[in-house]
Amino acid sequence: MRYFIQFSYNGTQYHGWQIQPNASSVQQTLTEALSTLLQEKMELTGAGRTDSGVHAQMMFAHFDFEHALPENLTHKLNSFLPKDIAVQKVFEVAADAHARFDATARTYQYHIHQQKNVFLDSLSWFYGKELKVDAMNEAAKLLLTHTDFECFSKVHTEVYTFDCAVAEAYWTVAQDQLTFTITANRFLRNMVRAIVGTLLEVGRGQMTLAEFQEVLNSKNRSEAGVSVPAHGLYLTKIVYPYVSFDSTN
């Protein structure tokens, strides 16, 4: 039987989602906890991978287990896991369901605060320069008219295509805090952080809308802005055609 697990994590102490040698990862930590509680060596396949220091408010993975799950597994996992990983629910899905390939949309948010705040420092990026948010939103609209995002992709990465379908991209402001929200069917490595860094150049008046369009057309990572720090980035939502977020385990 195949099961989905929905969880969240603060990525500060982890070198991303994916298991890697000589580094702590969310995948390894969650896999070890699940294996211990189910008394069987488990393998988790995630909905994607987040880089070192990136957080997830909503993440999914699937695993196979040929028995009914123990009672109160969610509670037991949360008791066993460290405080920076939390499981929301575990539920059975179809045998061919896939956490990565079945996802139809993913949403990321990037958080910036513009006044020094000791309570946000590790969960949002402090950026005190004056920004023209209206110009940044005008530039963000151009993302919806584009498909090839090689200019924002990490170089030397193995992907079958640089095409992504962006459904929404916009900035919101609440007092001194800015949030960039972007939803697409898929994302390239480092894509969101590179987009944010480039939009900030627009916001500072260092890049025009026409120049932002030229970056999109260039397919050249060196034409785009620098990548912003990882700790302000959150994976906030993943959509599946068969998962209801109203149910609980």
Image (cartoon, helix red, strand yellow):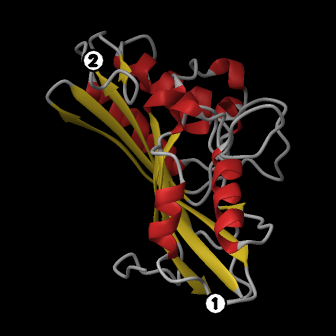
Dot 2, crowdedness within 10 Å: few (<14), some or many (≥20)?
few
Residue 181 is situated, as x and y percent measured from the top left of the image, at 39, 45
* Label 1 close to label 2 by CB (< 8 Å): no
Amino acid of disc 1: Ala
Dot 1, crowdedness within 10 Å: few (<14), some or many (≥20)?
few
Which label is found at residue 196?
A: none
Residue 175 visible: yes
Residue 55 is situated, as x and y percent measured from the top left of the image, at 49, 41
| Residue sticking out furthest to the left | 175
Residue 155 is situated, as x and y percent measured from the top left of the image, at 78, 29
Relative height, residue 104 to residue 199 (above, below): below
Relative height, residue 64 to residue 120 (above, below): below
Relative height, residue 88 to residue 224 (above, below): below
Instruction: Name the image quarter holding residue 173.
Output: top left
Determine the residue positioned at 26% across, 12% down: 130
* Closer to the camera in the image, 15 or 37: 37
Residue 106 visible: no
Quadrant of the snapshot with the C terminus: bottom left
Please state the total of marks drawn on the protein image: 2
Secondary structure of the residue carrying tag 2 is: loop
Determine the residue positioned at 63% across, 90% down: 68
> Mark 1 or mark 2, which is nearer to you?
1
Amino acid of disc 2: Val
* Closer to the camera in the image, 10 or 31: 31
Quadrant of the snapshot with the N terminus: bottom right
Secondary structure of the residue carrying tag 1 is: loop
Q: Which residue is mark 1?
A: 68
Determine the residue positioned at 53% across, 38% down: 11
Which label is found at residue 118?
A: 2
